[in-house]
Image: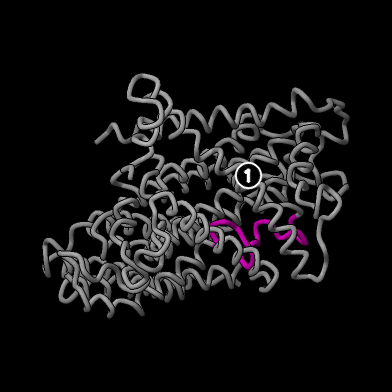
Amino acid sequence: MLTNYIPLALMMMVAIGFGVIMANLSKWIGPRKPSREKLSVYESGMVPIGTTHERVSVKYYIVAMLFIIFDIEIVFLYPWAVTFDKIGAFALGEMFLFIGLLFIGYIYVVKKGALEWD
Amino acid sequence: MFQDLNQFIVSLIGKGDLSDILSVVVYSALPLVLILLYALVAILGEMKISAWLQDRLGPMRTGPYGILQPIADMLKLIQKEDTTPKLADKKLYNAAPFIVFIGSYMAFAALPFAAMYAGARINTGIFYIVAVSGVVVVGILMAGWGSNNKYALLGSMRSVAQIVSYEIPAGLAILSVVMIAGTMDLQTISHLQQGGLQNWFIFGGPKSLAGFGGGYAWILTPLMVVSFLIYIVASLAETNRVPFDIPEAESELVAGYHTEYSAMKFALFFLAEYANMFAVSAIASVLFLGGWNSPIAGFLDAPWMGAIWFIGKAFSFVLIQIWIRWTLPRLRVDQLMHICWKVMIPFGMATVLLVGTIVTFLAH
């Protein structure tokens, strides 16, 4: 079974090799005339103001946390989806319970206003 | 005919070390050749179709009817200067294009191009593709953070929020196919849909196989159409295409997360974006529209014809993506998140539960 993954490792090597060649091609062939303006950060032609790495709105982190919860839910659903019809109505009931609990959480999140972006 | 490409090579040059090595090389390099050829065609296609939709001619000077334009563009990009901003985080900045490219390239490994060829036949198929496509997000965030540019950082943050959010409805849409098929292996999913249009998963899956519900499977059609639409919309968002292209909204963010990239590093991002477009289109056609199967049983279904059906189906989705680009206006950030979290996720959950109920009590 694991031997099926060998082509994946080979493809990874092909992808890395191709990437290295591609990215260095213009380094080898292209010109090299650095200047102060060229190496500064692009800000529509103005001199850059302030720092880039400022604080990010908390709403952003809320989306990230919600994503983790829902994505893990889906990861758990995949193995269930492959075998649930062999187990029968019991597996279906379990999954109704699981998604139901998550849906209650979802309603709570919506009511709390975590999914408002104004 | 041949079960897979390996047997084809053996029949050509005989069994031995040479045929083993050759098949390994072909298996691992074929997706790369496909991506490069496809990118040339798709870039020209995008330029030409955009032009026609706007009543222009598009590129006309490079070669007959402008068909050599993508090659000219590529040669020009090779000759450009590769700049790295002085304040950039060098490690992140240089690694980002590789990670984005590898993430979208590795998705090609598990796609079944024909009955006789799938790069790697693994039983986790679609799950693996969803997982490696997720790596692209890391690369995009690295590009934005490493560039130390405000436009790039904003673009990459938007892109990450969007891709990550739309992964959930896309995952739920894929799930309904996995539930009917009972497998995640994309080659098996393609085999199940053999025998014509009515066996495709958008119409409820196979009708005459043991273990599947025969005529009852038709009941699933409306649910599968909903899943299909959810997947198509989510895939547009995952590839940052219009109407979900706020990460690259050129009127506000210049070029989004690849603002600071030049020369071939930019080309890698570009290639990865086009590869991604093909990958999501190919997944949509394998999961819902029969993959390499012909729509009519017995009509042009020689094993090698599968590749043509498959690429044809995937290409028509790429065409639709280009068409949509010039048809719909760009969404605002809050509208985009609203559609994902408040419309598509509840619908996705409801379809999963309904498909599960029907499969348990009727269709199997």
Residue B357 visible in the current orientation: no
Residue beneath the point at 46% across and 75% down: B343
List the residue tagged with mark 1.
B271
**The stretch drawn in magenta includes residue B126:** no
Residue beneath the point at 37% across and 70% down: B197
Residue beneath the point at 50% across and 52% down: B279
Quarter of the image for the N terminus of chain B: give it.
top left
In the figure, B86 relative to B49: above or below? Answer: above
In the figure, B99 relative to B278: above or below? Answer: above
- Callout 1: SS: helix
Who is closer to the viewer here, B96 or B278?
B278
Which chain does tag 1 point to? B
Residue B258 at x, y = what percent?
69, 45
Q: How is the image coloured?
A: one colour
Image-quadrant location for residue B317: bottom right
Using residue B235 as the reference point, say whether residue B260 is left or right of it.
right
**The stretch drawn in magenta includes residue B252:** yes
Image-quadrant location for residue B118: top left
Judged from this view, the residue extending furthest toward the top is B17
Who is closer to the viewer here, B331 or A118?
B331
Residue B132 at x, y = what percent?
44, 44
In the figure, B309 relative to A34: above or below? Answer: below
Residue B65 at x, y = what percent?
80, 55
Who is closer to the viewer here, B343 or B311?
B311
Using residue A63 as the reference point, say whether residue B270 is left or right of it.
right
Query: What segment is highlighted magenta in the picture?
Result: B236-253
Residue beneath the point at 69% across and 52% down: B43
Residue B322 at x, y = what percent?
65, 63
Amino acid carrying label 1: it is Leu
Q: Counting other residues with Cα less than 10 Å from the Cα at mark 1, is it few (<14), some (14-19), or many (20 or more)?
A: many
